[in-house]
Amino acid sequence: MYALGARRSFWLALALSLLLHAALLCSPGWSLPQEEEARTLDATLLLPPPTPLPTPIKPQPARKAPSPPPKPPAAPSMPEVPTPPAGEASASEPPASAEPPASIAEAVPPAPTFAPSSPLPPRIGRLPASGRIVFRVIRGEGFVIGESEQRWQHDGERYELVAKTRTTGLAALFRPVEVVQESRGRFDAHGLRPLAFERWQNDKLKERIRFLPEENSVEINGLRVEFVAGTQDLLSIFYQLGVLEAETPLGVAVAAGRRVSTYAVTVGPVAPVELPQGVRSARAYTIVAGNEETLVWLDADSWLPIKIRHKDRKGEVYEQLATLIEIE
């Protein structure tokens, strides 16, 4: 009788756990960090084309590239700071059925040859040439819903960043999601200068951005908006803050959604951050955009992101905590 009662209690607890996770994952506010349109979150000088990087960060099978969206006849002026509501898509967003290309290198426009008028920020030389960081993705009060991996490589002139986030465990069972972000560009006196950015969700192209400073414009899903010196994308922004090593408040422009907007960044003191690998010293940067807020902790030695916390406009909190750091 005791064994029978114990088995019944076990199955009842399991059923309640599954119902709780299902309710959380299927709630209207569920989303991965940075999965929605950008609200949370450099530049004018171009370098001579360098020699190709020795090895790609993320080998991918050859895929057919989607047809580029048509360009509008005239470039509209840059909108003001207010950003579109979450989930609002550009009228010229790439077709959802598009397949990801083998690499976004083909989307990077050829850069004219200019010599830099000032030296590169010294922090670039301290950024490790390549490596990866694996994050545990947590929603709310400790619910592990996924895993994220960021890879980077650079040769002092060009860089490539790749981030892949996916649901795992019960989250993957109830709502499988995989988001891939890629950023390519160069370094100049302002730090990172993105030239191309793409975001895919479940193998569907959601956002494509081309930075065209020589034409004083940024092309977002085919829509031309005015270029702002130092403009970043949603992935490069974290590494740009490390390159700048800012210690005072600043504004950072980011291209996403349907515009280029400037967001306020405040800088906190260096403090200990507890990770599964142990305690590390890091500086916190708070990025505020409207009623959304993102905090990123950059390691005090490598200036790599080791913790990211995002609070969306609905009040949902998502946290990425580094569980593995590999510097090659």
Image (cartoon, grey):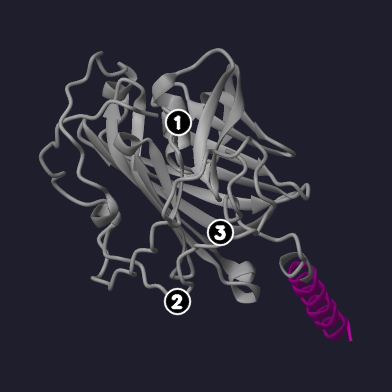
Residue range of the region highlighted in magenta in the rendering: 1-22
Residue behind mark 1: 228
**How much space separates mark 1 and mark 3, taking CA atoms?**
20 Å
Left or right position of 320 against 127:
right
Residue 90: assigned label: 3
Image point (56%, 43%), residue name? 321
* Residue 56 is inside the magenta segment: no
Residue type at mark 2?
Ser
Residue type at mark 1?
Val
Query: Where residue 122 sits in the image (x, y, percent)?
Result: 30, 16
Which of pointers 3 and 2 indicates the residue nearer the eye? 3
Count the labels in the image: 3
Q: How crowded is mark 2: few (under 14 residues within 10 Å), some or many (20 or more)?
A: few
Query: Where residue 21 sits in the image (x, y, percent)?
Result: 74, 68
The tag earlier along the polypeptide, 3 or 2, is 3
Q: Are the residues at dot 1 and dot 2 in contact (C-beta closer than 8 Å)? A: no
The residue tagged with tag 2: helix, strand or loop? loop
Residue 9 visible somewhere in the drawing: yes
Residue 328 visible somewhere in the drawing: no
Q: Work out which quarter of the rendered image holds the C terminus and state it.
A: top left
Q: Work out which quarter of the rendered image holds the N terminus and state it.
A: bottom right
**How much space separates mark 3 and mark 2, taking CA atoms?**
16 Å
Residue type at mark 3?
Ser
Image point (77%, 66%), residue name? 27
Q: Residue lying furthest left in this view?
A: 51
Q: Is residue 22 above or below residue 5?
A: above
Residue 97: assigned label: 2
